[in-house]
Image: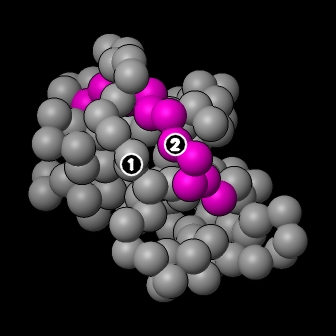
């Protein structure tokens, strides 16, 4: 499955960034369209956090570019200013939530899209 992920050149997502990560967490905390892994659930109703506890190799992404934009549309300029890009991965180990996915990187990105 194709997975779309916002990340920097080191492969880290924006929530782990030392300058903007805490600000993004503050902005998105408690907003229904940004549920954390405790609240976002798979198709069987299991929270995504269950999978993260089972295997720490999972990281966050999105099932489509549209889903990614729905999550980060208001922050695109900020992410661009800190050199984030959209990396597109192919992974067979994906758990789809209602708002995001978690997946395991099986190789490097197959495509990179500048913001």
Name the residue carrying label 2. Answer: 91
35 on left or right of 59 = right
Disc 2 crowd rating (10 Å Cα; few below 14, some 14-19, many 20+) is some
Mark-to-mark CA distance, 1 and 2: 6 Å
41 on left or right of 78 = right
Disc 1 crowd rating (10 Å Cα; few below 14, some 14-19, many 20+) is some
Q: Secondary structure at mark 2?
A: loop
Residue 62 rendering spot, x and y as whole percentages = 58, 42
Name the residue carrying label 1. Answer: 105
Q: Which residues are drawn in magenta?
A: 84-95
24 on left or right of 33 = left
Residues at circles 1 and 2 in contact by the CB criterion of under 8 Å: yes
Q: Nearer the viewer, residue 35 or 65?
A: 65
Who's the residue at 65% across and 59% down the image?
95
97 on left or right of 4 = right
- Asked whether 88 falls inside the magenta stretch, the response is yes
Q: Nearer the viewer, residue 108 or 113?
A: 108
- Predominant secondary structure in magenta? strand
Q: Nearer the viewer, residue 102 or 77?
A: 102
Instruction: Work out which quarter of the rendered image holds the C terminus and state it.
Output: top left
């Amino acid at each position: 499955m194709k997975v779309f992920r916002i990340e920097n050149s080191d492969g880290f997502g924006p929530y782990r960034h030392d300058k903007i990560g805490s600000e993004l967490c503050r902005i998105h905390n408690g907003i229904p369209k940004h549920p954390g892994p405790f609240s976002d659930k798979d198709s069987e109703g299991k929270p995504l956090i269950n999978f993260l506890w089972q295997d720490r190799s999972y990281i966050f992404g999105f099932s489509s570019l549209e889903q990614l934009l729905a999550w980060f549309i208001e922050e695109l300029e900020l992410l661009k200013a800190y050199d984030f890009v959209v990396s597109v991965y192919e992974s067979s180990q994906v758990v789809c939530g209602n708002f995001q996915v978690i997946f395991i990187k099986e190789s490097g990105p197959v495509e990179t899209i500048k913001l």
